[in-house]
Amino acid sequence: MLLIVLSAVLVPLSRALSQLTQELVARGAVEDAVKTVSGNDPDAIISRQSYLQGDTIRVTLVLATPVDPDTVSEAERGILRRTGREARMIVRRVAGEEELQMLREGLSVAQPQAPEDVESIRVELMARIRRPLEQLWPEESACLKDYRISFTDKAVIVTVLYEAEIPIDETTREVLAKGLQSQFGLGDVQLVLEGQVPPQE
């Protein structure tokens, strides 16, 4: 019995840690690729966006310096070597000083720093869960107690624990699920609601 329980706990945990490790490797590979393309000059980067989900890693860069297609291709190959996944980097240079000034003025929100360790990723993932739950949770009919995240090979699973006299209805569950899918940028986020009746006083 103990072996069964340990297996039920350790197998999902191992998969989750493996997925987190892969994401860390991908983030590191993208970071190095961006440095290569930008000539290791942070001031040359006007904006950047990275998408690490799926079979292909996508990076969009806007630079203030000239773009060398061969350097971009080499950076893509570097990502492939380190992650085993195809990479697509879309890099362009701003047309001139006027566009450069407009872009810099429009970037009022700084790009978030990539998490550098498992704890940082855990905090980021839990924050992604917390935002839609705080915004969409039916506080008048259910008390949110806790939530956790787990992974399978193909899906992210969010389990929410709550107390309520009446179980949360399907419409509310769908609203919460769509909010979580939006936060993770994935269509396959499974929401599991585990409710119990509050203790009688």
Image (spheres, rainbow, N blue to C red):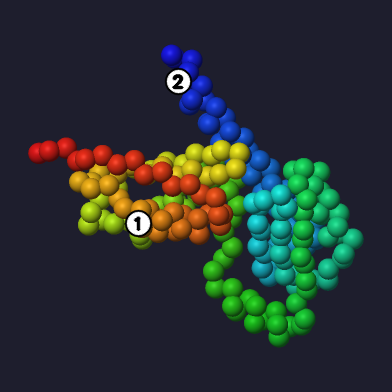
Report whether 89 appears left or right of 101. right
Q: Which residue is mark 1?
A: 172
Residue 5's tag is 2
Question: Alpha carbon of mark 2 to alpha carbon of mark 1: how far?
Answer: 32 Å
Which of the two discs, 2 and 1, labels the residue nearer the N terminus? 2
Location of residue 8 in the rendering, given as x and y in whole percent from the top left corner: 49, 25
Q: Is residue 187 visible?
A: yes
Location of residue 156 in the rendering, given as x and y in whole percent from the top left corner: 53, 45
Image quadrant containing the C terminus: top left
| Observer-nearest of 52 and 160 | 160
| Observer-nearest of 162 and 46 | 162
Q: Amino acid at mark 2?
A: Val
Classify residue 75 by image quadrant.
Answer: bottom right
Q: Amino acid at mark 1?
A: Thr
Q: Is residue 152 above or below residue 14?
A: below
Identify the residue at image location x=57%, y=30%.
14
Report whether 21 appears left or right of 3. right
| Observer-nearest of 199 and 130 | 199
Classify residue 66 by image quadrant.
Answer: bottom right
Report whether 57 appears left or right of 188. right
